[in-house]
Structure formats: C-alpha cells, structure tokens
Amino acid sequence: MSASFATVEPVPASVPRELVRDASFDRLTAAGDDPWRAVAALHDEPPVIWMTDASFGRPGWVLTRHDVIAEAFIDWEHFSSQRSGMVADLLGEPVRLNPIEIDPPRHHAFRRVLNPFFTPAAVKDFDAPVRQCARELIAQFAGRGECEFVDDFAVPFPSYVFLDLMGMPRDRLGDFIAWQNDLMRATDPMQRVAAARAIYAYLKQHMAAQQANPTNALLRAMVTAEIDGRPIDYYELMGMFYVLYVGGLDTVYSTVGWILHHLATHPQLQSRLRADPAAIPQAIEEFCRAFSVVVTHRSVAKDFTFHGVPMKQGDEVNLPIMLANRDPAVHADPHLVDIDRKPRHITFGTGTHNCVGLHLAKRELRIVLEEFLATFPSISLKPGETPRYHTGRTFGFDYLPLVLG
C-alpha cells in the first residue's frame, strides 16, 4: 500500500482538540541554547500530539515518547514509509529514497542488494581508508593549534568517505555540500527544488557511467541488481543512489559535531578516553543515544486508532528520535551523558527500516574519536567565540571553533 501526506488543514475535524498544539516544532527546538533540553519539553505532553507546524510548515502528529516512537517504527502496516517523499515532491519525478521510502515486502528485495556491503564484517574493510581520511584532514590544521571543526573536519570527513565509496570525485565536494545544505535546510522552497534537481542531474550521469563501467563491488551490485527476477529499473536505482547520497553526507557530520562539542566541554571524559581507548566503542553508544540528530517521518496508511487517538489515512507522523532516546521513562537522568550506562537506544531506527549504514557510521565515529584524542592532548572551545547550531529535520552545528592543545 502506498501512502502520502494528505493533510492540508491545520487541524482536521478528526483530531481531538485536547491534543492540538498551535505551535512550531522547529521554533520550539531552536529556543534557548540547548536544543536537547528544548525539545524535551515535549515529554510533558501526551505521547501523541498534533502540531499545526510539525514539519516545514505542515501540520501533523508528533510522537513524544520512546515506546510509541519505537512502535511506529516497527508497525509499517499502519505507519508507512512508502510515499512520494521530499525528493519526489521537489523533483516532480517518482524517485523514492530506496529502500527508506519503500515498505515490505518489496523493501526486503532492495535491502538484500545493499546489506552484504554494510555488515559489521564488511565495514571492517573501511577502517584503513576511513582512518586515512581522518588523518589527512587533521594534518591540515594540527599545526595551527585550533580549527573550525564544522568546515575543517565534520563536513568533509564523512563526505570524503561517501565519495570514495560511491566512486565520485573529491574535487566536486564543494558542490555536494552546497546542494546538501540547500536540500535539507534552505527556507526558500525554490532553493530546495534547485538543489534537488542539481543532485539529480549529477547522479543521473554518474549512474549511467557506473552502469557502463562500475568502479567497485557495491556499485556493481547496485547497477546489476535483479528485483523479483527482473532488472532493477531506472527510478528504483536512482532512488538507491539518492538515498546513499543523502544518508552519507548529513547525519555523521551532525553527530560528530555534537560529540566533539561535548568532549570539548568535558575534559575529564577526554582524559579518561585517552587513557583507555578501549572504552571508546561503549562511549559511542552513549553519544549516539544522547545526540540523536534525526527527526524522521511516516504516513498513516489507513484509518485506525493508535493508543486511543484516531488517525486518518494520509496523516503525517513525525518521529523525533531524540525524544525516544532522552525519554526519562526509559533512561534515568536522560540529559546526563554517562558512558558507563548501556543504553537501549534507537538512534538508527528499529524494525524493518533500521539504517543500513549503521555499522559504518559507528565505525566512522569511533575512528574520529581515536584520531582526535591521540593527536591532541586537549580539546576545548575557543574562548570568546559562540558555537552556532541548527535544528529542523537534523540537529547539527554550523560553527564550532575549537582550541587544540
């Protein structure tokens, strides 16, 4: 079953009035100087509320607690990912992010193409090139004693990893980053349309080149894939290229910024991890819990009642993962970053649509911490400077000046 966001009324008649909040999710999260505590104000609300501006000015449901968010991830029959999503709407072409915007059973056929290349065993092969990327970037500012972490490292690092993975030239990095920023965060709709189309035009020619002469095993598997006994079609393949582009360039950059900001303001934790690098993998799990940067979406596939709340086909449902991972009903003292806890987090989703690249993402984060902590005896915020961040669909830093001892 295919679903789409059908709601146009700010408050449809079907929505119980006691659950309506005439408010903007993005303005709420941008208030104050700590977006994690700002968004956590929604924990004081019912588990399911209706916001008149839930996403990009659209009204919709917002789930506020771990249990209902996790349930929505798992229940794809009611909370569908299959829709003409953001990219399709911007392009005016039927490009679904593949397999993110495709539900079972078809979802499984596309995941089978990608899964072998992103298992824990498979991503071990990325260790050397990922570490080399980190070291090359660090070498460019190590002698200065400072860096602007976002531009000097956080943005180019996962981008280089992705570009190498996809056989794309590094000299186009500036274009890729500009397109990504406009696509994900521009307030002008036409700017977002232009970015989506620029990405599409580049991916179209890159995809054709890979079909003619694939440059690695992943790309060969993608362009020669068979789905239900037939060759993968143009839009299915384009959706697969597009999802790797979007996923490869934004979430790791955002997450690693929050981690370095936390380390820069917690020198004792820095010292502990330098002295005991074996603790870094467990620390990554807690950092992923505490700094879950993504708000994802579902569409109600058919009329039904969810925890006593009537939902209608086409209603948009927003799943702020940070609300699940900082839910005080699940995590004691949820705003405390404690690397000794063993968190039950859903940063990478859960159920059928969990993130295909989660093992690679964790490996990238681990390597960044290892390299920064081994290279610099101290990391701190630059005095007299104020870091800047954005919220929205992804929480991330725009400006993070660091002093590197």
Image (cartoon, rainbow, N blue to C red):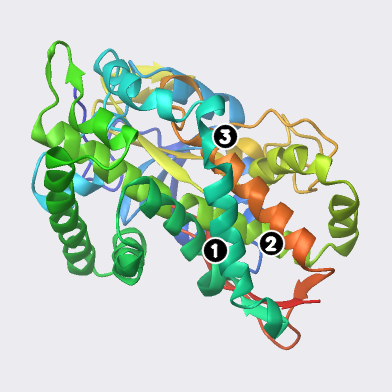
Point 62% across, 48% down: residue:
365
Question: Would residue 328 be visible to someone looking at this image?
Answer: yes
Question: Would residue 186 be visible to someone looking at this image?
Answer: no
Tell which tag, 2 or 3, sits nearer the viewer.
Answer: 3
The residue that label 2 is drawn on is 260
The residue that label 1 is drawn on is 154
Q: Are marks 2 and 3 in contact (CB under 8 Å)?
A: no
Where residue 241 sits, quadrant-wise, is top left
In the shown orientation, is residue 258 left or right of residue 181?
right
In the shown orientation, is residue 284 left or right of residue 390?
right
Between residues 364 and 57, which one lies in front from this camera angle?
Answer: 364
Q: Picture coordinates of residue 372 (x, y %)?
A: 72, 62
Q: If you read the primary sequence from the N terminus, does the residue marked by circle 3 or circle 1 appear first?
A: 3
Q: If you read the primary sequence from the N terminus, does the residue marked by circle 2 or circle 3 appear first?
A: 3
The residue that label 3 is drawn on is 124
Give the numbered dot on residue 210.
none
Q: Are marks 3 and 1 in contact (CB under 8 Å)?
A: no
Please state, as top left, top right, bottom left or bottom right, where the C terminus lies in the image: bottom right
Local SS, label 1: helix
Point 78% across, 60% down: residue:
374
Local SS, label 2: helix
Please state, as top left, top right, bottom left or bottom right, where the N terminus lies in the image: top left
Q: CA distance from mark 1 to mark 2?
A: 10 Å
- Residue most extreme to the bottom: 384
Q: CA distance from mark 3 to mark 1?
A: 21 Å
Local SS, label 3: helix
